[in-house]
Amino acid sequence: MPALPGTSERRTKLRIAVNDDSMSTWFMAAAADFCVERALLLDVVMDDQDHTTQRIREGDVQGAVATLSELVPGWRSVKLGRMRYRAVCSPA
């Protein structure tokens, strides 16, 4: 989508790979202001966080949320933090 309806401004599209847990919790809120400030459109590819680095290697995406800390040649890795998981249940 080169431009949003009603605008003549062309927007740069950035294709990234993001895991489902990040998408359903923190990613959209974190990416929203970044995209607005830079007039970016995100093309989000959903994949397991253990496989998103491979998508960079294959040239399928320009960025990714990943669990692997190994560097892909020509790319830089920035630690975003960590997400702790807790197993919970209810009597229902």
Image: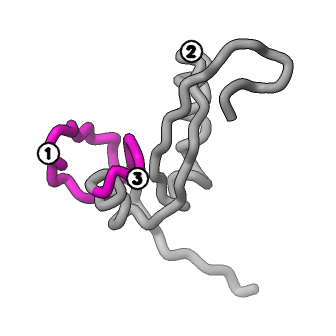
Secondary structure at badge 3 equals loop
Distance of label 3 from label 2 (alpha carbons): 25 Å
Left or right: where 79 falls relative to 21 = left
Q: For the point 53% across and 54% down, which residue is it?
A: 45
User: To which residue does mark 3 refer?
Assistant: 60
On the image, the x and y values in percent for residue 25 come to 58, 51
Q: For the point 54% across and 43% down, which residue is it?
A: 27
- Residue 43 figure quarter: top right
Q: Nearer the viewer, residue 52 or 89?
A: 52
Q: Is residue 43 above or below residue 86?
A: above
- Category of crowding for the residue at label 3, using alpha-carbon neighbours closer than 10 angstroms: few (below 14), some (14–19), many (at least 20): some
Sooner in the amino-acid sequence: mark 3 or mark 2: 2
Is residue 80 one of those drawn in magenta? yes
Q: Which mark is residue 73?
A: 1
Q: For the point 75% across and 85% down, which residue is it?
A: 92
- Magenta segment boundaries in residue numbering: 58-82
Q: Nearer the viewer, residue 18 or 39?
A: 39
On the image, the x and y values in percent for residue 84 come to 40, 59
Sooner in the amino-acid sequence: mark 2 or mark 1: 2
Q: What amino acid does circle 2 point to?
A: Glu
User: To which residue does mark 2 refer?
Assistant: 37
